[in-house]
Amino acid sequence: MKRILQFLALLELTGAQLAAAAEKPNFIVITIDDLAYADIGPFGSKLNRTPHLDRMAKEGRKLTSFYAAPVCSPSRAALMTGSYAKRALPIPHVLFPEGANGLSPKEVTVAEVLKEAGYRTAIVGKWHLGDQPEFLPNTQGFDLHFGLPYSNDMGPVSDGVRTDLGKPNPAPNANAKGKGQPPLPLLRNGAVVKRVLPDDQQSLVEIYTDEAVKFITEKKDKPFFLYLPHNAVHFPIYPGKKWAGKSPNGIYSDWVEEVDWSVGRILETLRESGLSERTLVIFTSDNGGTPRGLNTPLRGHKGSTLEGGMRVPTLAWWPGKIPGGTESDAILSNFDLLPTCAALAGAKLPADRKLDGANIWAQLNGAPDAKPAHETFIFYNGLRLNAVRHGDWKLQIAMGRGGDAKTKDSVQLLYNLRTDVGEATDVAAANPDIVAKLQALIAANEADLGKDGIAPGCRELGRVENPKPLIPHDTK
């Protein structure tokens, strides 16, 4: 009898655990590479047809002051770790193939946090946080990785990675960017599936979408976290064969419109699977757009700490939980996604390190009494502090010729982003008290992440000895 009672108690416990798992929401984060602020309909595009994103905005919430980082690797590090990129991945620019450095295995990613809480985890798409086995997604909490380890322009010129669809390869140049890089690999769980050539470049959006849909449908009975970072619309521009030439505005628009199709298919899969009311979907970009895209009304592009380099078009969608057709201008960032997902999943945050992100659920669901998640946001370009925002005010530091903010020829420009989001008019002279307040915020940060270089608040960078290419050089 005692054993029977123990067995029944176990069944009750298992049933309770299953019920608890069923109540946990799913999370999907879709990141587009180099998508400009006004490249999609919800943020003002008149060129690109994005009906699925238009619907997503009507059913969800626009986040109009959502920040990433100026370039790829730092942005992805911030999203993964809930921290400023300089804290989690202290590098000056981006990571390259066959590199000795990457995101440290000691970092705790959003995938690891959710996996500990019972989630199935997948990344389908671009990683770009280190290509050595010690740095790849399966060592950072992901059950599944399918995609490229870095950007689609990183590989031999002869493989079409330095030119757009339909254009000839550039002539050999000893000083060309990327000269000597190994072949670009498509990976599945760390193993090379194939060498990526132009036809493969054209198929990336479609095969990523198919893989994502497969993951959703196979894992729908348990909570899951899906990270879908497309290589589109990063140079070189390779819209799929079903999309090339279909838009009236060239191949860049073709690719934006294919990305819109992909988002539509993901959302429709959720609806058909009965998961739409149990799934939070975030759509965003990894940094500001290039001059190919449209950043209106923002000034600047990818690689800068002007608004056009770091403020990215972002949508949040969760039918029944996020009010449709609404928007928020609150200061938010991709490093907020880890603590927000953890809070909604009932997962534990790492207690042994500083996180810069906040739980922004109140901003996502439009709570009328929501307090600001961030009053201050610091703009880093690599290891260098270039600007600080507090409320509506942004102090942009233009570095001196030596790259040092302390040199006598450095200039500090003040903008009111509420009235001048395009950062056109410097109002520092008329607001010395505001300038002093923002300068004090920069000074207070000196003991943490500092102004330039490795600072006390930077965590350890991952490093391996004798890095090797995933595909040997000069292999066909």
Image: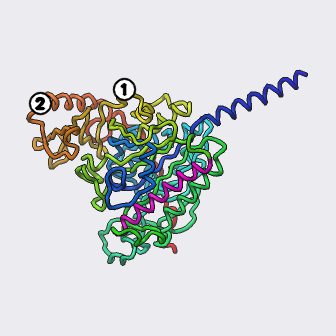
Q: CA distance from mark 1 to mark 2?
A: 27 Å
Residue 366: image quadrant is: top left
Most foreground residue, 257 or 81:
257
The residue indicated by pointer 1 is 371
| Image-based side of 375 in relation to 225, left or right | left
Residue 432 numbered mark, or none: 2
Residue drawn at 44 percent across, 34 percent down: 365
Asked which secondary structure carries label 1, the reply is loop
248 to the left or right of 199? left
Looking at the rendering, in which quadrant would you find the N terminus? Answer: top right
| Image location (x, y in percent) of residue 226 | 54, 47
- Please tell me which of labels 1 and 2 falls first in the chain: 1
- Element carrying mark 2: helix
Front-lying residue, 12 or 197: 12
Label 2 is placed on what type of residue? Pro
Q: What residue span does the magenta drawing correspond to?
A: 251-273
Residue 172: horizontal and vertical position, in percent? 33, 76
Q: Is residue 461 visible?
A: yes
Q: Nearer the viewer, mark 1 or mark 2?
A: 1
